[in-house]
């Protein structure tokens, strides 16, 4: 049964692979599971048909027979639990890989995503410079803790896992900010993730959607 | 083997149960697993001994033999996967319960937590009223989607699950804001969670720590 995911008909990041379908595509590519994509416009995302799948009007969703999931983290975990390759077999190592999934989305991503939102919606506000500084300070604290834990390892805890997959997608949003470069080990970590063949395939697939939408 | 969790020696919320150890205490109470608590001061949280357990210098952590976990979402999931009572047996229903865990922490919590931070750190800024308004608008969108999905159900998807447990802890932070009251079904949902005996036991346990720290 080929799962179906939803993605933006027209990516707001112009094909940089920052939309959250990228995580799901990457996970499916890592485990070798083919998938179909249904593209939705911003208008369609707020309509009943899509809201029946995703009550907050977002992408991605994941349909596999009777199962409908949303939340990119939950979808990646579902894929990882039902295929080999994204979670270790050892029980404790598996729990730690899942821990890094939550750390990526709940501790590292919030200030990084807030910074993106502030750059879009608050750029002309009188508080913008101070707000950006506060967010970048918060990001630096997270990157410091992450970098200390990564040390000189290739991945966060042994072999590449779904935790690394999510963490790399979160950190990629800092490209161009200069913040990642303050920790060369984290720059190398992100580059290592982006060099994986499964990442490349997923990245090209989402970029092709954007290229097509541009005509 | 009795797991050990960490919690604030002196709760910044004065015993309201908003710190993230509350989620872990509640989950452990739901499944009937006894636990020990090690209290840490704000100073200790930034020291090497604690950072070895939690690289971002936060609470809670969870130690169970050789396993060390952080991230409240990951700890609750670990507890739910190793005991009966917090995840349904049916495979698809189980995936949806985990989806609601991610929805609570990644979609509903961010604007709610940002509002708390703004109320602490930006109250005296000239932009405070406008910033608060923006955050409350974002929260209203999330609550609207959540309320529509909850409908007149007791819980988000059938029986009470770890997804409801996390969602209730996230929504509790809105007590006193008036936002929850705009959706009576969500007020009742939170009250239903807070009325569970396991919630009450966890709440009293964390409040006793605060009461003791007050002398």
Image (cartoon, coloured by chain):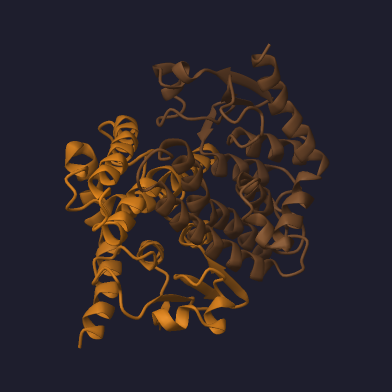
Chain colours: A brown, B orange
Q: Quadrant of the N terminus of chain A?
A: top right
- Residue at the spot 26% in from the left edge and 84% down from the top edge: B213
- Residue at the spot 58% in from the left edge and 36% down from the top edge: A20
Q: Report the side of B205 relative to B104 (left or right).
A: left
* Foreground pick, B180 / A183: A183
* Foreground pick, B14 / B111: B111
* Foreground pick, A57 / B202: A57
Residue A192: % across, % down: 79, 51
Residue A160 lies, with reference to residue A46, above or below; the image says below
Q: Quadrant of the C terminus of chain A?
A: top right
Residue A101: % across, % down: 59, 53
Residue A83: % across, % down: 72, 43
> In this rendering, does residue B133 appear at all?
yes
Q: Report the side of A64 relative to B100 (left or right).
A: right
Q: Report the side of A117 relative to A159 (left or right).
A: left
Residue B72 lies, with reference to residue B1, above or below; the image says above
Residue A26: % across, % down: 71, 38
- Residue at the spot 44% in from the left edge and 71% down from the top edge: B59
* Foreground pick, A59 / B149: A59
The answer to which quarter of the image holds residue A55 is: top left
> In this rendering, does residue B88 appear at all?
no
């Amino acid at each position: 049964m080929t799962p179906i995911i939803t993605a933006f008909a027209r990516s707001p990041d112009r094909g940089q692979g920052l939309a959250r379908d990228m995580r799901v595509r990457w996970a499916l590519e890592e485990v070798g599971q083919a998938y179909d994509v249904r593209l939705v416009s911003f208008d369609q995302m707020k309509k009943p048909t899509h809201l029946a799948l995703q009550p907050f009007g977002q992408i991605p969703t994941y349909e596999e027979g009777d199962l409908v999931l949303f939340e990119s983290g939950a979808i990646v975990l579902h894929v990882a639990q039902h295929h080999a390759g994204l979670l270790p077999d050892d029980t404790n190592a598996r729990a730690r890989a899942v821990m890094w999934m939550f750390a990526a989305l709940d501790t590292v991503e919030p200030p990084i995503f807030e910074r993106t939102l502030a750059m879009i919606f608050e750029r002309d506000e009188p508080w913008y410079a101070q707000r950006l500084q506060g967010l970048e300070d918060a990001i630096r604290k997270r990157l410091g803790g992450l970098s200390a834990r990564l040390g000189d390892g290739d991945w966060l805890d042994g072999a590449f896992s779904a935790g690394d997959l999510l963490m790399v997608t979160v950190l990629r949003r800092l490209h161009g900010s200069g913040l990642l470069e303050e920790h060369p080990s984290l720059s190398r970590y992100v580059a290592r993730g982006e060099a994986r063949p499964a990442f490349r395939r997923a990245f090209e697939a989402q970029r092709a959607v954007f290229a097509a939408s541009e005509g």
